[in-house]
Amino acid sequence: MDQTGEKTGQPARTEINELGEFGLIDRLTEDIQLKQASSVKGIGDDGAVIKYDNKAVVVSTDMLVEGIHFDLTYNPLKHLGYKAVVVNLSDIYAMNAIPEQITVSIAISSRFSVEALEEFYAGIKAACKAYQVDLVGGDTSSSQKGFIISVTAIGSAEVSDVVYRNTAAVGDLVCVSGDLGAAYMGLQLLEREKSVYLEHPEVQPDLEGQSYIVGRQLKPEARQDIIAIFRELGIKPTAMIDISDGLSSEINHICHQSSVGCTLLEQQVPIAKETYDMALKFNIDPITCALSGGEDYELLFTIHPSEREKVADHPDITLIGAIEAEDKGITLLTKGGNRHTITSLGWNALKS
Amino acid sequence: MDQTGEKTGQPARTEINELGEFGLIDRLTEDIQLKQASSVKGIGDDGAVIKYDNKAVVVSTDMLVEGIHFDLTYNPLKHLGYKAVVVNLSDIYAMNAIPEQITVSIAISSRFSVEALEEFYAGIKAACKAYQVDLVGGDTSSSQKGFIISVTAIGSAEVSDVVYRNTAAVGDLVCVSGDLGAAYMGLQLLEREKSVYLEHPEVQPDLEGQSYIVGRQLKPEARQDIIAIFRELGIKPTAMIDISDGLSSEINHICHQSSVGCTLLEQQVPIAKETYDMALKFNIDPITCALSGGEDYELLFTIHPSEREKVADHPDITLIGAIEAEDKGITLLTKGGNRHTITSLGWNALKS
């Protein structure tokens, strides 16, 4: 009677982790064709784009699952609510649109009290205030186990302002906001302190002086300021994506979808001192944190080379490489002068 | 360290089921104020309404959790995919809008094969085809246990066409589409057959001649045809809601939000013969199925009395009562001539 494919002797069973998250999405959605005139962009970018007259409405949705995406041992519920909103807003900004509404659905087991949920919603409301978005709907349900959060963010832009992933061109400059790898090192630190706590509950967590990397993990921000800077400087990026799965994964999305290659310069990739130092303590190469860490929620974007001067000296934007012909591949030029192919090693939510 | 409120000796702990689903939502969202000019309607109707020029965009979202909302023992995955879409589309129609896009997020444990998910997506795609909506996005994640589905539907209408719950007026007629209680009796039958199967696996399920009520439970439809009828007949309902939690719950929403009362006539409430017969077999009063069953996904709406002739003879629409002053209460006039208050006994997803 089991439909999940568990029973032996059933027909073909392909394991989900054979395909990975992106492979699974491709397989489930490969035959989908958009029929509605209003559907401008479907699956395959940070958000879907729906057109009403000259207004583009951008919709993005994410699901966060306890034990997979967060751990209530060290994710305070208020911060979790804040983060659940911010990661979705980041997708709207990554389309060069402004988020204006969110919906929040949750499923919870009876181990949660009303007061615990109020903490979570305090974080949701704090994010709504910080980013000027309205909570306009959602759903509340029971779960058999754990806490599941589904947030949908809705934003808008003029149709001509929307920026996609698949429009980078040869010669464009590759830019990134902020710095990379901090959230990943914050997670490593929190996981280490959790292990220590579980073995020696009397030891107090040692997070001294690590507020930057821990903060980047527990309470990330989305780069609404960068979108405002684009407006001020009169820049429209040629392509853009937000960094949720790590620089290597995101640059692969832009290059593959745009049918181009690129060279990124290791020495240009922005890494904060706290991230760098903690990576060395953990015997991790700092560039690996930046490439594969994920959860940075920075913006990775390309601009026409004529825009170089507008961003060259901006403290929040770093030029890290250039778009090249597709046959040049997607490569990193290391500090030592070696060239490595950047494979898509982003964090895979579906790895077993 | 536990934030959920589990630990003894913590401050105030209020159990979620003390408040119920609607009480919990009220408590978590009571201080929310809409700030964006585009936010026309937030929490409290079938969908949120966002305005871009003269276009109203309606957004609705639902979460379905294995073991709470569905049981894979008797919910075929393809039907489940279909139903997950339809229940959201129903909310868009209930605002007198036309759904055009959906997003689908899922969290799955490793017990699901790719082939099982393809079955589920076949149902999603069948619903998209039947209702002319595009699947434009979503998220795919692991779960620790069970299958969780979150669907968001997006529709549009002219701003002046949107129908809310809180605009019924004294003298309006109360109408309902289709018939009520069938999905509930289908569920009772499926649950009974499951119990039999678990105790006596050699006994084949006895669903003979029950395809109507079982179909209403496993593969419901949303009433896009009724919205088309409104357009044809030139009717704009004065208030509308879809029946997901049962007639009693929904009429209470309309009356409370509109500050009115009503009388519904028991003998007018449409109940299919199969539903009626099965209710008697289960020793349930058929009107109870219609009032408290839920999952009908019919439309409950009110119209101005001058529109009576337009709907009076329509085979898919039944007049079941009238809106009265608030102090008259929300009552059912039984076949025997007694008057009972209709309390909101809708199915409560959060009852323990």
Image (tube, coloured by chain):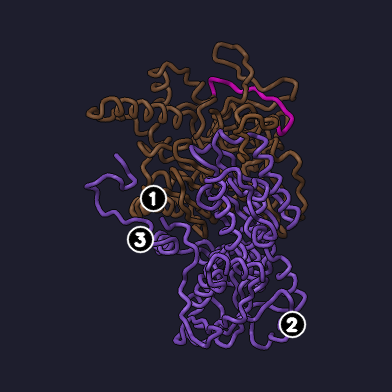
Chain colours: A brown, B purple
Counting residues from the start of the chain, the first of labels 3 and 2 encountered is 3
| CA gap, disc 1 and disc 2 | 48 Å
Residue B343 is covered by the magenta coloring? no
Residue A259 is covered by the magenta coloring? yes
Total marks drawn? 3
Kind of element beneath mark 1: loop
Q: Residues within 10 Å of mark 1 (few under 14, many from 20)?
A: many
Q: Position of residue A33 (x, y in %)?
A: 77, 46
Give the vertical position of A266 relative to A211 (above or below): above
Kind of element beneath mark 2: loop
Give the vertical position of A223 relative to B89 (above or below): above
Left or right, B56 with reference to B37: right
Residue type at the position of mark 2: Asp
Where is mark 3, residue-wise?
A: B18
Q: Nearer the viewer, residue B352 or A266?
A: B352
Q: Mark 1 falls within which chain? A: A
Q: Please state, as top left, top right, bottom left or bottom right, where the N terminus of chain B lies in the image.
A: top left
Where is mark 2, residue-wise?
A: B313
Q: Is residue A255 visible?
A: yes
For the residues beneath circles 1 and 2, the answer to whether they share a chain is no
Q: Residue at x 57, y 63 (%)?
A: B184
Q: Position of residue A263 (x, y in %)?
A: 64, 22
